[in-house]
Image (cartoon, rainbow, N blue to C red):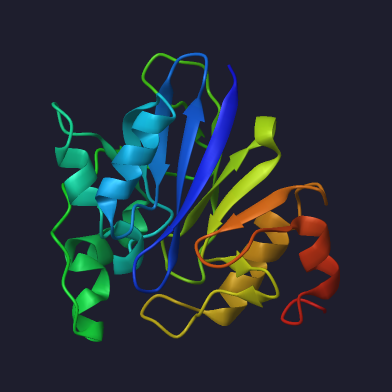
Amino acid sequence: MKLRYRRLTLGPLPNNVYLLGDDDSGDAVVIDPSFESKRVLTAARKQAWNIRQIWLTHAHFDHIAGTAEIAAAFDPSLPVGLHPADQAWYDSGGGADQFNLSIQQPPAPSIFFEDGMTLSLAQGKAHAVSVRYAPGHSQGHVMFYCEALESLFCGDVIFRGGIGRYDLQGGDLETLITSIQEQVFSLPDDTRLLPGHGPESTVGYERVYNPFLRI
């Protein structure tokens, strides 16, 4: 297994969309497909990766906007993974209407994440990633830890010098801080943090310099 990831920054917010692929098998997944889905499909082809699944850290609209188009680009349609606690957000279009936007309704999830679950890039392949449940930004937020790459795909839980917003439905500051302490800061300091927005960071940097977490 030879894992790599590629980041594409897409859409009006702008969102980090990740392709995580195995160069040996050619299998890959998309994490948090936002807008501009065709760019994701093109990038996968250039890497000679075959997208097998879609993984969602949470169901806010800017992280699911491209799910329908990418899933439908394959036959059969790609399976989608989501934590059940974010199903209501998912079914209502991720709250896009609150921002006078709309997205194509994505297909029903068929993979339901839970804390500690192990994931593979394709059915029957070796496990490559573990799920870390991290509510606070949304009730069903999860992160994906890839030990082989020493990287955490952390969605909107933590950013370089910041944390996710907690004022939307299902958000809670105390819960978010607890998630960071238990699910992010429990990882080695040199673990790369790959967020849903903005530049990457490391656990060690945020432990020392994040102004929201110096407690």
Quadrant containing the C terminus is: bottom right
Task: Give the residue furthest to the right.
Answer: 208
Image position of 185 with respect to 29: above or below: below
Side (left or right) of 72 relative to 63: left
Residue 59 appears left or right of 207: left
Residue 15, x across and y down, in percent = 43, 64
Q: Position of residue 73 (x, y in %)?
A: 17, 37
Tell me the residue at 51%/23% (across/down).
22
Displayed quadrant of residue 2: top right
Asked whether residue 123 is in view, the answer is yes
Number of disc labels: 0
Q: Is residue 201 above or below residue 81?
A: below
Q: From the top left corner, tell me how far across and down residue 50 is, in percent.
A: 34, 25
Residue at image point 43% right, 27% down = 121
Check the image and report above or below for 146 versus 159: above
| Left or right side of 172 for 148 | right
The residue located at (53%, 23%) in the rendering is 127
Query: x, y (%) of residue 80?
Result: 28, 41
**Closer to the camera, 137 or 65?**
65
Up-down: is 81 above or below 25?
below
The reply, left or right, for residue 112 in relation to residue 93 is right
Residue 108 appears in the rendering: no
- The residue under the point 62% across, 48% down is 152
Tell me which corner region of the image, top left, top right, bottom left or bottom right, holds residue 1: top right
